[in-house]
């Protein structure tokens, strides 16, 4: 049996982002059912919010974590929850028909979305995550 062909780094990153996006659609929808302060106008608003949330997490979150690294280290990572709550609040500010009503709703929603994504990943286990976390690159000579 021959090994599966390796995907390019760009393909792996695209699959990783699309998986996160689809997982976030479900997680944000579930969070809106649990928290009355997370509101949206239509299903397409949830899709747009999931897309923005995924993009914000992919682009801004690493920068903010780097800038807040001393706080993350001092609090043994608890500050990451507050950063994630900020990402959810920021998504609400960017997407007009998606509303996160308060700080506590954002914090609870961020924790809930994290747990929902972890459960979705554990149940469905995408192929690219079975071999390790996130995109991997195979160097050939």
Image (spheres, helix red, strand yellow):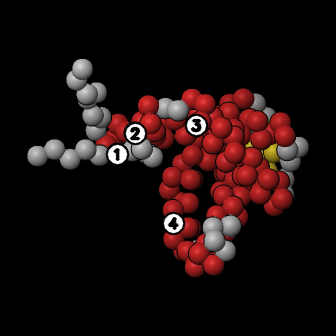
Give residue 90's quadrant in the image. Answer: bottom right
**Reading the chain from its start, which is encountered first: label 1 or label 4?**
4
Q: How far apart are marks 1 and 4 (CA)?
A: 21 Å
Using the image, determine if residue 77 lies above or below residue 71.
Answer: above
User: Which residue shows up at 84% across the image and 40% down it?
Assistant: 34
Q: Which of marks 1 and 2 is in front?
A: 2
User: Which residue carries the number 1 mark?
Assistant: 136
User: Which residue shows up at 40% across the image and 39% down it?
Assistant: 131
Q: Distance between the residues labelled 1 and 3?
A: 17 Å
Which percent across, then down, holds residue 116?
Answer: 69, 40
Q: How far apart are marks 4 and 3 (CA)?
A: 25 Å
Which percent across, then down, holds residue 19?
Answer: 52, 35
Q: How far apart are marks 2 and 4 (CA)?
A: 27 Å
User: Which residue shows up at 54% across the image and 48% down it?
Assistant: 55
**Reading the chain from its start, which is encountered first: label 4 or label 3?**
4
User: In the image, is 108 to the left or to the right of 3?
Assistant: right
User: In the image, is 141 to the left or to the right of 28?
Assistant: left
User: Which residue carries the number 3 mark?
Assistant: 121
Image quadrant in which the N terminus is located: top left
The answer, for residue 4, to whether it is visible in the render is yes
Q: What element carries label 1?
A: loop
**Reading the chain from its start, which is encountered first: label 2 or label 4?**
4
Q: What element carries label 3?
A: helix
Which percent across, then down, holds residue 78?
Answer: 68, 67
Circle 3 Cα neighbour tier, 10 Å, few/some/many (<14 / 14–19 / ≥20): some
Q: Which one is nearer the viewer's eye here, 76 or 79?
A: 76
Give residue 86's quadrant in the image. Answer: bottom right
Mark 1 near mark 2, Cβ–Cβ under 8 Å?
yes
User: Which residue carries the number 4 mark?
Assistant: 63
**Reading the chain from its start, which is encountered first: label 3 or label 2?**
3
Circle 4 Cα neighbour tier, 10 Å, few/some/many (<14 / 14–19 / ≥20): few
Circle 2 Cα neighbour tier, 10 Å, few/some/many (<14 / 14–19 / ≥20): few
């Amino acid at each position: 049996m021959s090994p599966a062909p390796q995907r390019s780094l760009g393909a792996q990153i695209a699959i990783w982002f699309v998986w996160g996006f689809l997982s976030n659609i479900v997680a944000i929808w579930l969070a809106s059912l649990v928290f009355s302060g997370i509101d949206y106008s239509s299903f397409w608003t949830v899709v747009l919010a999931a897309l923005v949330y995924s993009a914000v997490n992919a682009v801004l979150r690493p920068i903010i974590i780097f800038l807040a690294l001393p706080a993350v280290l001092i609090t043994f990572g608890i500050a990451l929850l507050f950063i994630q709550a900020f990402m959810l609040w920021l998504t609400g500010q960017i997407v007009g028909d998606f509303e996160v009503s308060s700080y506590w709703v954002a914090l609870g929603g961020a924790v809930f979305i994290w747990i929902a994504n972890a459960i979705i990943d554990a149940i469905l286990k995408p192929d690219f995550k079975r071999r390790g976390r996130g995109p991997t690159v195979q160097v050939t000579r």
